[in-house]
Every structure is written in structure tokens, then in C-alpha cells.
Amino acid sequence: MTEKPGSFVKSYGCQMNVYDSGRIGDLLGEAGFAARSELDQADIIVLNTCHIREKASEKIYSELGLIRQMKEERAREGRNLVVGVAGCLAQAEGEEILRRAGAVDFVIGPQSYHRLPQVLDDVRKGARPFVGEFDTQEKFDELARRAPRRRGDATAFVTVQEGCDKFCSFCVVPYTRGPETSRPVAEIIAEVEQLAAQGVREITLIGQNVNAYVFADGATRWTLARLFERLSEMKDIVRLRYTTSHPLDMGDDLIEAHRDLPKLAPYLHLPVQSGSDRILRAMNRRHDAKLYRDLIARIRTARPDIALSSDFIVGFPGETDEDFEATMALVRDIGFASAFSFKYSMRPGTPGAERADQVAEDVKKARLAALQGLLEEQRVAFNQACIGRTFDVLFEKPGRHAGQIIGKSPYLQSVNVDAPATLIGQMRRVVIERPGSNSLFGRIHQAEKAA
Ligand code: 5AD
Ligand code: SF4
């Protein structure tokens, strides 16, 4: 029997891309390719790219250089290697990629990759297609016809919403992912049921503006909160999460869901970007720092043990020392368990890139270092405060040492425990004993052992 040709999908960027890469792998599977774990074992390579910051895009062009060499070596051996570029860079620079990167056989945008079978056909006939329509609804429908395949994972992402209508002045997403589109509720429920039947126990609902989810099913208006209420009823699903959210879409019902639904993890990733009202206005965030602070206060009242995470940008055009200090003050006042922070990166086609008052690189660097120092202090303090607490840990995989397994706390911390591998895929009460550098160590709660 001849071995099937191999595929390799490499994912860059956000969770949305991780999800899409899985589905691209499924489509390649249907087209007769078997997933391989190494790039050099593949007969087809798809880079699922990111365009969010300049560095992300540069990384991909350099990877394409390496792949070109690989393809040339293969050609000398008389073998073919098909190379595709998918994702947000593909959407933004599709024509340019085809011009610049001779090794690339096809380019397919994030809202049209369900057309991959047709594209592969075209490539076989010698074409070099670029498909970049915003067919989000069609993509959802197409994906719903196929069951996602998870290979023994305890946790999975499920896309519920894509695209963005907010047009923050730094961000490419509205241009690469198109308008906000919510997925039909029946498709989401069906996908979660399939995943649960495959052993998945935790679901993270994802979307570029996930809390803007809204779907009318007859007279019923489905919001993210209502969706969580429905998914909470599934007995095999033990934990629910969501990411990423916009403060303006943080509805009262979602805050109440944090109070009322025990399965909804007490963890919220809510990007604020800046603590300065002047900069928030320039960023077109459509809210001020007070709105964010008030929101956090209400969420903490609803769910006192909630931990917070956020995204920050330093050095947006026009940011002064005083503006930056307002960001530091907001971080000090609120306190984050974890966070992502970035230097502003000019993105072609966005309003921020047009501004003349760009901040000097060394200033951005110094501000980022100061902010990250503070955020790291808060992260370490949060982990330290977890010592002695008992958490529900969902075990996901074997640990680095024999006899150890690793799971996630409600706060997305990795927790190492000495316990049998048979617990992988299950949730247990774990007493947290000590912090590691990037994780925690704990032991199974006595009551669970007896049970
Ligand atoms: N420069 C720096 N960071 C950015 N982000 C989005 N666009 C840019 C940009 N041009 C950050 C934001 C967003 C996260 C996903 O990436 O903080 O929330
Ligand atoms: Fe990157 Fe944004 Fe595209 Fe995700 S949606 S891959 S973060 S540009």
C-alpha cells in the first residue's frame, strides 16, 4: 500500500487562526492528505498567517524564503511540494505574495478557505489562484457540514463570531476578516455536541468580538450569555470560556452569566489598550477609561473571584508621558492576573499609520519595558496568592516528568500534578502547593482521592 501524501498546516497569530488551521487540516484530510508533524514530511504546506503587527508579517516572508529552498530541493529530486498561504496576511497582501514569493501556489483569505477543494483542483490544473472574498456566512455553512476532528483533546475552540465593525484606528482586522458575522446557534450547538462526544470537556467560544455575538432564531434573540446558558446544560461540558471581547459589548446579561453560571470560568480577557482618554479617543475605541473601570467594578461585584486579563498598546501616535502614566495607573488600580502588551506597529491602510506624530522607537521600547515590568509583578503576585487554594483543574496532557500530568486552572494557569495519566481529559479538585516560573504545582484534593 502506498502511503498517503502528507500535509502540514502552520498557524500564526490568534486563537481564530488556531481554530481555522484545524479546519484547514480537516479539509486537506478530505482531499487525501494525512497530517504530518514535521514540515519536511509534507507534500502540501499551508501557512495560516497573521498580519496584526509588522513582525508577524516579516516572520512569514522569511519562512516563505526557507520553503522556497525546500521546494527547489524537492524539484531536483523530481518531487512536488504545493505551498499555500492562508489567513490575514494572505487577505491583505495576496497579490503581492504571489508576485514576491515564486514558491507559492495559492493564496486563500480567512473568510474563504472553505473553498480549498476547488482551489486545490485549480492548482493541479496549473493555476495560481488568489481567493479573498468575505464569505463568512457561507464559510460557516460549509464548515457545519463537516464534523471537526479532535484527536483526544480535553479542550477545544469553537468559532461563534468572526470579523469586526469597530475600526480601532490601529487595527487591520476589519480589513482582513470583514464585517462582524455571527454563526447560527444550531451549528454551534451541534459542533459542541460533536466535540463532547469525542471527549472534549472544555469549550472556548472564540471570535474577534466574541461578546458582540447576536443571532435571531425566530423570535428568540441569542446573545453570548444565552449561548452559555444553553451550553451549560450539556453534562459532558464542564467548563466554558470565551475570547476576545470589546468593553462596549459587555452586556448586562453576560455580567449576570458570570454570576449565575458555575461552568463559566471566572476569568475575563477584556482588552483596554490604553488608560488615557485622549489616546482611547484617538484609537477610536469609543469608550473612556472610566467606562472600563466601572465595568470591571460591576463584573467583580457579580463574580468576586474573577481574574482579569487585557491587551495594551504603548506608543500609539501622539502618546505622551502623561498618557502612558494613565495606562500605568489603570493597571495599578485594577490589577491583572495576566496580560498581553505591545509596541504600536504601523499597519498599512489603517488610520493610525497615516499620522505624522509617530512615537520614537526608543520611547516605545522604554514604555513597554516599564509596563511589562508592572504586569509581570502582578502576574507573579496573583500566582503567589493562589498557593493554598483549591481549584478545579482539567487535565490535558502528560507532564515533563514521569508520573506527572498537566492541566489548567480556571485562570488558565498550567498546573503540574503527580497523578495517573488516566485522569487526562477529566477535571479534579487540586490543592495548589507552590508556584513554578510559568506554572503551578499542586496535589489532588484528599476528598477526590477517597471518592
Ligand atoms: N500594533 C500593536 N498592537 C496591535 N494590536 C492590534 N493591532 C496592533 C498594532 N497595529 C494588539 C491589540 C489587540 C491585540 C490582538 O493586538 O492590543 O487587542
Ligand atoms: Fe492576526 Fe488579527 Fe488575523 Fe488573528 S485576526 S490572525 S490576530 S490579524
Image: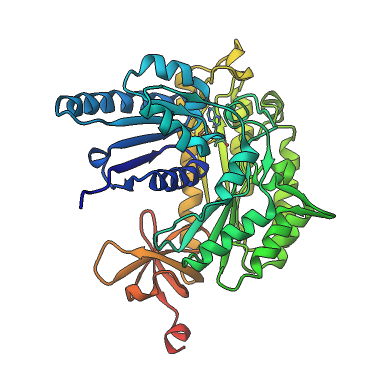
Using the rendered image of the protein, determine whether residue 301 is visible from the camera's viewpoint. no
Residue 251 lies, in percent from the top left, at: 76, 50
Residue 55 lies, in percent from the top left, at: 42, 26
Name the residue nearer the viewer: 10 or 209: 10
* Colour scheme in use: rainbow
Residue 348 lies, in percent from the top left, at: 54, 17
Residue 233, placed above or below residue 449: above
Q: Residue furthest right?
A: 219
Q: Residue furthest top?
A: 356
Using the rendered image of the protein, determine whether residue 189 is visible from the camera's viewpoint. yes
Residue 418, placed above or below residue 12: below
Name the residue nearer the viewer: 350 or 382: 350
The structure residue drawn at horizontal position 44% and vertical position 44%, both measured from the top left corner, is 27
Name the residue nearer the viewer: 420 or 325: 420
The structure residue drawn at horizontal position 48% and vertical position 20%, both measured from the top left corner, is 93
Q: Is residue 269 left or right of residue 296?
A: left
User: Hey, which quadrant is residue 65 in on the image?
Assistant: top left
User: Hey, which quadrant is residue 395 in on the image?
Assistant: bottom left
The structure residue drawn at horizontal position 57% and vertical position 26%, both measured from the top left corner, is 172
Name the residue nearer the viewer: 155 or 97: 97
Q: Residue furthest bottom?
A: 450
User: Hey, which quadrant is residue 232 in on the image?
Assistant: bottom right
Residue 225 lies, in percent from the top left, at: 72, 57
The structure residue drawn at horizontal position 69% and vertical position 54%, both measured from the top left corner, is 185
Question: How many dots with numbers?
Answer: 0
